[in-house]
Amino acid sequence: MTCPCSASRFRWLRHFCSLVCAVVGCCSLPPAKAQNLDKPLQSIDEDITAFAYAPDGRIAYSVYRRVKTKVYDALEHDDIWIQDTGGKRRRLLEGQKYTRGAQTFSYLIDSFRWSPNGHLLLAQLLTTTVLDDSGKTEDSFQTMVYDDSGREVRINKGENVILDAADPFFLPDNATIAALSEAVKPRQLFSLKSTRIDIGPVKSPHDGRTFRDVGPIPGTVSIAAIEQDRAMNGPPRLQHLDLFTDNDKELATLENYEGGLSVSPSGKKVAYFIDKEILEVRDLTAPNRVARLRVGLGVYRWASDDSRIVLKRALEKKSGDLVWIDLPALASVPANHEIPIAQPTPIPILHGLSFRDFAISPDGHSIAVIIPGKRNLLVFPLSR
């Protein structure tokens, strides 16, 4: 069950909000509204490293755990948990019991991704393995697969781990997992790989091509991708690719790419940062229809209707305030013409407080945030 929240327990939020109000004059909100920060809809009082909403509103999350051995006293082996919508929790993985033969390794869970049906869960691990007695180590990406009851989902009856698999996601069949494999280290360029739960690796028709980022198009077996030649001499190109055929379509040649590729919930729009200030939004079916916004580089999530985003004005795993950004209408821009840059007015969320991470619930009615420092998770109503 969700733990009750006392006034003192979240006093830091109330005091910080009061300070913000005093400095920037945002006290036009009625007192009762401000008190909502003391009353989250849900809370998880753990040191959380990553989390993700399931389609039905459950939350998968990982908890930092320190493990000691005879040689090392600061290894990290995160636990994995699921909290249901009523607050009941179940542990899927006890990190201190997770071993791989005689190898010494440390891992943190960096992200989660649910299957479309909400029954399977992917956990991306950033792993550091000790290779020999000299202490030499090797970093790698791995993906673990579980079902929502906590059972390991074994690939082709083997292990439940996919090696060298970053940014994984399920396809609509709930049985095929697509991911990125490092082609140029560290995390410069990637190749595409796919794995079926029943048979294992599936050959990609895009072998030999390298990408900086990919984003699944909801409800399809296609992706939006930022392709870059291996020598990184040419410009980045925005591509529409089918994962299992050689069908592809170049949507645009970009001036630059700074990160943040993401496809909207409807699958009709794609957005990405072209530099540290400008977010570009493009129509996937009519790629000459485009808009640019000056918002500053950060982490964003789409609203369910594609009309706006929630932006954290800080980089991944860094703390920043949350704001609503309304997206301008897309307009056709002829080739070789300059794209106008909109200057949207940010609308603060949760009184302008800073948070380390966030996610919007599937129904769009609430927002989950990770507070700095203690890294506890709180869920609040989400409104304009």
Image (spheres, rainbow, N blue to C red):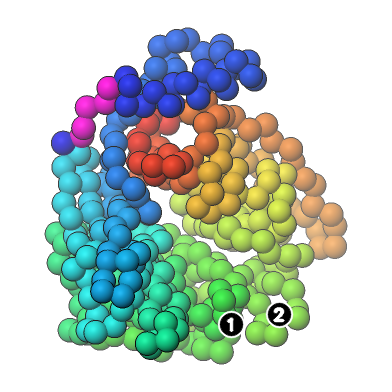
Residue on which disc 1 sits: 184
Q: Residues within 10 Å of mark 1 (few under 14, many from 20)?
A: some
Q: What's under tag 1, amino acid-wise?
A: Val
Q: Number of labelled discs?
A: 2
Read off the magenta span: 2-6
Q: Residue at x 68, y 64 (%)?
A: 257
Residue bearing mark 2: 232
Residue 143 lies, with reference to residue 85, above or below; the image says: below
Judged left or right of residue 113, residue 154 is: left
Is disc 1 placed on a helix, strand or loop? strand
Q: Going 74% across and 74% down the picture, which residue do you hit?
A: 235
Rendering coords of residue 321 (x, y %): 56, 37
Task: Pick the residue in front: 4 or 328.
Answer: 4
At horizontal 63% and vertical 33% (from top left) the residue drawn is 346
Majority secondary structure in the magenta region: loop
Residue 273 vs residue 281, the one in the foreground:
273
Q: Which sits earlier in the primary sequence, circle 2 or circle 1?
A: 1
- Residue 212 visible in rendering: yes
- Mark 2 lies on a secondary structure that is loop
